[in-house]
Amino acid sequence: MDAPVHSWSCSYYVNSAKRWVSGRLTLTASAVRFSPSSGGEVGAVLLLPLSRVTHINTESSCFIFSAVTLQERDTLKHWFSSLKPSAGAVFHVLQHFWRETLAQHTHSTHTPLSRGQRLISMVSDTQHTLAHTGRALSQQGEQFQHMIHQLDKMESDLGVADKKCQSELSKADNKAPPPEGSARTSKEILSVPVVFYRGGDVNAADVNTGSLALLVSALELHDANSRLVYRFHKQEVDEIRVHGVCDISVRQRHIGKPDVCFRLLSAKMAEALCVLEVQYKKKVEFARDYSGFQDMSSDDITPGSMASCNAEFPAGDLPPVQLHVQQNAVSQEEAQELKQVLEQTPIIRGNLVLGPCKEQWRRTEKILRNVSNEECVSRQMKVRAEGQSSGSELRVRAQGQSSGSEQRVGTQSQSAGHELGLNSSRKTQERKTQHVFNQSIAQGETGDLTAETRGRTSQSRQKSKSVNTLTGYRSGGKAAICYTEAGHEMMVEQQTAGDCSESRRSAWSGGVILCVRMTADCFTVRTASL
Amino acid sequence: MDNSGKEKEAIQLVAEADKKVKSSGSFLGGMFGGNHKLEEACEMYARAANMFKMAKNWTAAGSAFCQSARLHMQLQNKHDSATSFVDAGNAFKKADPQEAINCLNAAIDIYTDMGRFTIAAKHHITIAEVYEAELVDIEKAIAHYEQAADYYKGEESNSSANKCLLKVASYSAQLEQYQKAIEIYEQVGTNTMDNPLLKYSAKEYFFKASLCHFIVDELNAKLAVEKYEEMFPAFSDSRECKLLKKLLEAHEEQNAEAFTEAVKEFDSISRLDQWLTTMLLRIKKTIQGDEGDLK
């Protein structure tokens, strides 16, 4: 029998006798044992192997306070209550040991996590956090949307209330004698001659000439004899629709009555519009058929017009359109860089919002920096590789097979993804994840350049020839490793030598750049002093 | 701090409020400002309830809030009535969970009547949580989560709806209603995989759906994993999918050791939560069924 791990005093509900028996609950590494305290009932000992338990729970009800229940496979439930010190404490211990049964019975000895595994764990943690962040953000976004919706509702309610108050006020005003010339007390800003249609239909027969006076507190429409046709108080105007540069309509809505609407045409409407836009900000709407937009778009979009534009330039001179295109041409490397940066973008977005991802953010930033330096570094590398004379040289044979299944799977699927074109967002996400994955591998393994790692890398390259770019990055800001397809080169940029082993520190000290040249079965590591 | 004074004061206030309510009900009282008296009584109950709260007499606070809510209802103040019921529910939650649920249900009735479904859904979640934590009645908790999800969906709050549905799925799986759980996980997974913010969670849902399939039938799980990989290519690269494949292989060979090894490897990198542990244990039991019984 196993040695007891822990024991607690408790009471157990005996199903057959329908009563509680007090006793002691003992936990061993693989089973739970209950023995009653009274000596007379020794036969009632319960021995329950943890492997038979399917569920552990804390439960309570009106009659039973804080019990721990163990669900046995065949729907038999064991209740333990009156646990000391508390049900919660016992529950946690039981749960822990029960959980461990899942990973029990293996002969493999417990080995500490390798560096690579630790890094994978870190990355998977960050991914987990990212997922949580995404969910939280999405929910917050939804809540904001609802808030906006509610605010809109409130605003419209207030609008109706306002209108009702106004109509009440105007009724009260109507009862009093109309104050003479009160309209003129408001200061006139601008007056423009207009042609107006009652009812807002521009094809209607009822057309009049007159003038539109813009006052501080109202809009007044006068006929040719300067008689007031209609006065829109500033608050009463519900909508000013701009149909064209010279063409607007003003509308006042009424509840239960037809709307009051005037269509106004004026050559000087542009001047009036400037004022109206300031005065009635939100109420000014540009109609879909607003001719101002139509004019612009028709010129820009037609391809024929571009061709004719090009033709106007004398031969020899570079037309500005072409020049523009040439400036925008994206080189292969730049596209590659851009792709990488884009791949990282979702991570950045996730990180900007929540603090826990700071670590990832910092690392992403580093990667981006390295990526942007990639071009110039690779150029330097080539020069150094060709004219290498002062550096020491170290040649290593890759050794046999390796155990890096993660790396292998990673590279293969990356190449598969590459063949598919990787255009859709789904692919991008996939590649992003892949990228992070590879990154962690490179991070974990290339720092020390152990023989195993070297073997693994070379093997993965043999398996998938189309590895494009694998960007490795070592945590702590020590080194960056880049694999490039072009010359089968792996570059290691060592910034500080703080983290590398003693034997290499001497070679790497002083900010040395290592160049790793790779052939089918071996690679050469060159060090060059700066 | 001694709050017994507050409690006494509160009891007095309640007595006074009771008196006012009675007098407003009488013939003469009804003639002379009955409603006004009721309003005053409402306010007094609310004040008393707050004092009970200070004295931590939750039951008394809850019933005072309840009284206030009923009077508000009588005065046709629906919104105030619902708010008071919620207050009552919150107070009762600490002493009498069943009564808390009754109060919250009353509030929900009012809110749904007013068309405030989002807030009604929120209270359904509260009730579900009470069932979950205090009364440990998982089936009722599931019913309330489902109701909340329905209301949220009606209001186009899909994120919140999904949250409730995921709870339903997780509890359904624990209660061995795997089909229901699978449907929910698949539905939520499909909804989230195209959302730029939520796509990172999709693999988790597909993983859980696959595990539920696995418990029911190994072949189903295999087909499901293939389907999910096709639907959501990123799933195939995930550690979860790799684990699933290893588990399927181990299960096919009835190799408990390989199964355990795969789980162990996964667990060493990202800890398995309680739900996953339960499900994996259930799957493991199907491998070593005979061996376990002999123990």
Image: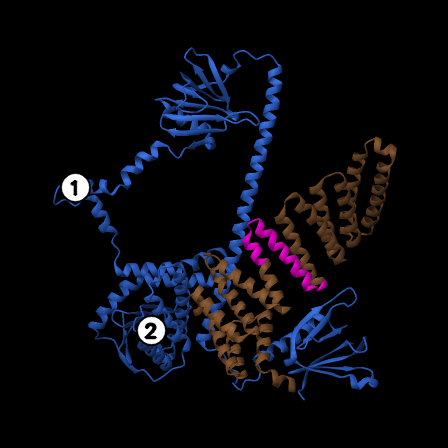
Chain colours: A blue, B brown
Check the residue under mark 2 and report the chain it is in.
Answer: A
Q: Is residue B295 visible?
A: no
Against B273, residue A47 (above or below) is: below
Residue at 66 percent across and 73 percent down: it is: A56
Q: Amino acid at mark 2?
A: Ser
Instruction: Give the main secondary structure, helix, strand or loop, of the magenta stretch.
Output: helix
Comes first in the chain, label 1 or label 2: 1
Q: Amino acid at mark 1?
A: Ala
Residue range highlighted in magenta: B135-163
Residue at 71 percent across and 73 percent down: it is: A69
Measure how far apart labels 1 and 2 are at the Cα level.
Answer: 62 Å
In terms of depth relative to the viewer, which is nearer, B67 or A97? B67
In terms of depth relative to the viewer, which is nearer, A299 or A23? A299
**Which residue in the structure is indicated by mark 1?**
A311
Residue at the far bottom in the pictured view: A1
Q: Residues within 10 Å of mark 1 (few under 14, many from 20)?
A: few
Check the residue under mark 1 and report the chain it is in.
Answer: A
Residue A138, percent from left and from top: 51, 54
**Which residue in the structure is indicated by mark 2?**
A509
Position of A507 with respect to A126 (left or right) is left
Residue A170 occupies quadrant: top right
Against B80, residue B229 (above or below) is: below
Residue B62, percent from left and from top: 77, 51
Residue at 53 percent across and 87 percent down: it is: A107
Residue at 71 percent across and 68 percent down: it is: A59
**Residue B36 in magenta?**
no
Circle 2 SS class: loop
**Residue B159 in magenta?**
yes
Quarter of the N terminus of chain A within the rendering: bottom right
